Image (cartoon, coloured by chain):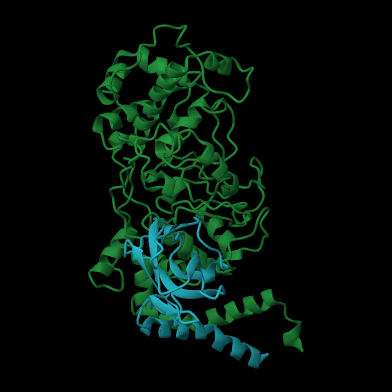
Chain colours: A green, B cyan
Amino acid sequence: MRLCALTWPAVTRLLALATLVGCASQGDSTKRDQWAFSESQISLLMRHQFDPIPPVDPTNAVSDDPAAQKLGQYLFFDTGLSGSGEHSCASCHKPEHGFADPERFSTTEATATRHTPTVVNSGYNRWFYWDGRCDSLWCQAASPLEDPDEHGTNRLAVAHHIHSDDALSEAYTTIFGELPDLSDSERFPLNAMPTDDPTDPLGVAWSAMDEADATEATEVFINVTKAIGAYEAQLVQGDAPFDQLLEAFEDGDATGGSAISDEAKAGAALFVGDSNCWACHSGPTFTNKEFHNVALPAVDGIDNESPGRHTGIDALLSNPFNSWGEYSDDVSNAEEKLGHLVQSPEQLGTFKTPSLRNLMDTAPYMHGGHFDTLAEVVEHYSDMNDPPLVGHREELLLPQLWTEEEIAQVVAFLESLQGMPIDSRLLSQPDSPL
Amino acid sequence: MTLLFTALLALGCGSDDTKADHDHHDHHDSTLPDDFDDSTEQSTESGIVVSYSTDPEALTESEEFSVIITHSGGVITEVDATMPSHGGHGMNVSPDLDDDGEGTVIANPFQFHMPGHWELFVQLENDEGAIETVRFDMACCD
């Protein structure tokens, strides 16, 4: 009768306790004898082998061009790409903070409503933004420039910025060919861009432009973002202690060697165990690159009931700068990538799975900066006791009820994914774009 | 209560035993069920033989691929895949079917966005007009 009175959560907790107690001696013994991973654990961990060269983006013809990468690096730090002359990409994607922002929400022209993700290892991404509204780095770089709450500039101002600076225009023409002659302010106003509001002066100026001139200005604007994307793709950070663990496995050493601690190894075992962490945080950058609802708690400053990917698909498909659009340098794979996307209520409240590499640089965590520490993140997944605020929780996520020791082990494992620092030459604005 | 605890203890450590069995299974992949069937040819109840292959043969997680279906009769009406451990949810893409009318159908794109066990379903209308479905186990990824 007493058994019948137990609730399922209680049974689950008791089962977990029994498992811990019953198997503790086994764990102690393993620890004494030195860690040895099972074949299945090694197989799962080996799926995270990192290739230090990200895939080339065929939609950006200059992604591999050193001159474009140099120009992009210059522009990434260029406050001339903002309406106020005070902000650059690096204002939010701070090199000293893993190209993320230590604040929950970045503040430039206004305060953002989602946490700034890192651009490190972004060359491996399939989708961009937390809701995947872009499918390339150059697409991602475009909308913040024209967002009045971020850079607060516009495509004509960007084109004139390049055109009016000798070094920038020389670098540009070397890579992309001749700049259009923007000197006729009747044809090319100093400020103009498409807007939803027909009364917006920027939109009025844009509507008055000849279509061919507008296209030329947009091409300059997008070439700027392609140069920035080419630079960002260079921001690769691997070579973590965890990667040395995998090298030990390749050498036939099931203990994984000594690059990471026994505590981190215990965390690795939990990561590839019944927790199912590995299912979404899979592959070389520890992300399956797709979208999941992880039942995050409500926090101030964001739309806690945001549809996430569900509406991100609409934004992606209507984005003129997606890989299927006229500004893409290769549309041959676009129909396959964008033309068959499923949009369903299952995606409500889902956000992109972030990479787990280099997390020590990029607190706070989650799309709303929900958690300040990795321990808080792991505790969330361990407890998993809050219903989602919208949609339904990812089915693979089940309460783990980890002990404090186990949470510390998973955190130690995550810390073992911290790679070697990025080449310091990539962390600041070069003296010249040339 | 002692009995309950003993039972729970046995259950708790039982998962390790299960895992050990898994490790001894041929595929050595704990993400796949013990009864994973890697056959690529099945027959419907009416005897239509259905087989599949993929292009490329080796699958990469989150990357598109094609499924090539050959069938000895009927008309293929749907080809899809779901993930049992993921609440039966399916892919994030919906493939088109290209039927050559001579027994081969190419379904494209497919995309497995999570590692582990997937199930491929091929639905066809047989020559009597009845709907039949065959199921294949698939693994993501190489």
Q: Quadrant of the N terminus of chain A?
A: bottom right
Report x, y in % for residue A131. Answer: 54, 45
Which of the 4 image quarters holds residue A301? top right
- Residue name at image x 56 percent, y 86 percent: B11
**Horizontally, is A132 left or right of A301 in the view?**
left
- Residue name at image x 46 percent, y 21 percent: A155
- Residue name at image x 46 percent, y 40 percent: A100
Report x, y in % for residue A335. Answer: 43, 46
Report x, y in % for residue A306. Answer: 64, 46
- Which is more toward the observer, A95 or B108? B108
Which of the 4 image quarters holds residue A181? top left
- Observer able to see residue A309: yes
Report x, y in % for residue A418. Answer: 37, 52
Q: Residue furthest left?
A: A251
Q: Quadrant of the C terminus of chain A?
A: top left
- Observer able to see residue A429: no
Query: Height in image: A158 above or below A3?
Result: above
- Which is more toward the observer, B76 or A121? B76
- Residue name at image x 43 percent, y 31 percent: A90
- Which is more toward the observer, B112 or A279? B112
